[in-house]
Image: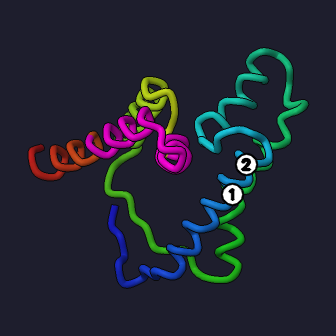
Amino acid sequence: MHIAWQLFTPWHALTGGLLIGLATALYVLGLGRIAGIAGIVSTPLRALVAGRGLAGQGTPLAFLAGLVLAPLVWRAFAPLPAMTVDVGYGALVVAGLLVGVGVRMGNGCTSGHGVCGLSRLSLRSLVNVLAFMGSGFVAVFVLRHVL
């Protein structure tokens, strides 16, 4: 992936961070649930697998719809940042599967542990975030400099 640093705007990044913090705070205060994306995605999927349908899944589905619609709303006012992916579909599938395994092993995802867990001063979340970041650093180093 190539990051176009000339398009980096700190005020937009700060605003985005504040909105993420506000959304997660409202989610936990309003529903008493952590806004971890893995849990939010899995809730309607578990209901479907269990044969209960999507009745009563309005909140997680609305949250997911917001995640999908946000870039479309942004694009209505400004161009989306340029992005390129330098790997093929096979590598993306393997990476996605590895992330899924890591989410299950870590009992949560980066948003649940990194945004919500760290803000609650959770030691388990700190260990998980350090493992996520360390694994990412090692993977990038090996892929870019060793292989």
Residue with the most extreme right position: 55
Tell me the residue at 61%/60% (across/down): 20
The secondary structure type at the circle numbered 1 is helix
Tell me the residue at 55%/66% (across/down): 17
Q: In this view, does 114 lie above or below 99?
A: below
Q: Decide if residue 94 is on the left or right side of residue 103.
A: left
The colour style of the image is: rainbow
Q: Where is residue 84 in the image (x, y as percent from the top left)?
A: 39, 64
In this orientation, which residue lies closer to the viewer: 1 or 62?
62
The secondary structure type at the circle numbered 2 is helix
User: Magenta region's main secondary structure?
Assistant: helix
- Estimate the spatial distance between the alpha carbons at disc 1 and disc 2, rounded to whole Å: 6 Å
Q: Position of residue 37 (x, y in %)?
A: 60, 42
Q: Do the residues labelled 1 and 2 touch (CB within 8 Å)?
A: yes
Q: Which mark is residue 106?
A: none
In this orientation, which residue lies closer to the viewer: 113 or 4?
113
- Magenta span contains residue 39: no
Query: Which residue lies under the disc numbered 1?
Result: 23
Task: Please provide the residue range marked out in magenta.
Answer: 111-134
* Quadrant, the N terminus: bottom left
Amino acid type at image mark 1? Ala
Q: In this view, does 8 lie above or below 53?
A: below
- Magenta span contains residue 118: yes
Amino acid type at image mark 2? Tyr
